[in-house]
Image (cartoon, grey):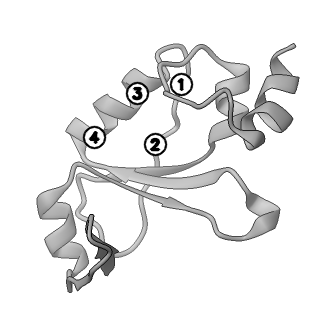
């Protein structure tokens, strides 16, 4: 994994999935396929699931087995974030001025 600091210097960091789950309560991966824009795969432990559930207090999230490589106490699910924001009450922060929001989410809520 690599990321840029404020000075735009690339810093390499090698992590295994075991390292990552020891440092985080949730892992979120956006789908990079343009046909699945807005879809996010989420996996979280108990504390992480409580945080995700709190973002969508009126929704029922059907948590499932997160797949290979994650601890047994982690669960996962796939979500289309723009559709869920448009269809449910949420505490999810979003930028209503963004081009994507105005073209996709705002139209669904009218």
Question: Counting residues from the N terminus, which is met first, the one under dot 4 or under dot 3?
Answer: 4
For label 4, count other residues whose C-alpha is less than 10 Å away and answer few (under 14), some (14-19) or many (20+): some
- Mark 4 and mark 1 residues within 8 Å of each other at the beta carbon: no
**Residue at image x 17%, y 74%?**
18
- Mark 4 and mark 3 residues within 8 Å of each other at the beta carbon: no
Tell me residue 43's x, y (percent): 38, 54
Rendering quarter of residue 98 = top right
Which residue matches tag 3? 53
In the rendered view, would you say 13 is above or below 44? below
The C terminus: image quadrant: top right
**Residue at image x 32%, y 81%?**
2
For label 3, count other residues whose C-alpha is less than 10 Å away and answer few (under 14), some (14-19) or many (20+): some
Relative to 78, 70 lies left or right: left
Which residue matches tag 2? 63
Question: Counting residues from the N terminus, which is met first, the one under dot 4 or under dot 1?
Answer: 4
Which residue matches tag 4? 48
Q: Residue farthest to the front? A: 7
Question: Counting residues from the N terminus, which is met first, the one under dot 4 or under dot 2?
Answer: 4
């Amino acid at each position: 994994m690599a990321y840029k600091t404020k000075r735009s210097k690339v810093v390499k960091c090698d992590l295994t999935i075991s390292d990552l789950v020891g440092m985080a309560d949730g892992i979120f991966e956006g789908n990079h396929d343009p046909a699945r824009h807005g879809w996010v795969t989420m996996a979280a432990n108990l504390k992480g699931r409580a945080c995700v559930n709190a973002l969508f207090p009126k929704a029922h999230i059907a948590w499932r087995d997160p797949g290979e490589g994650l601890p047994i106490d982690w669960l996962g699910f796939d979500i289309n974030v723009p559709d869920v924001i448009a269809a449910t009450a949420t505490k999810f922060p979003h930028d209503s001025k963004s081009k994507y929001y105005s073209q996709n989410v705002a139209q669904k809520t009218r």
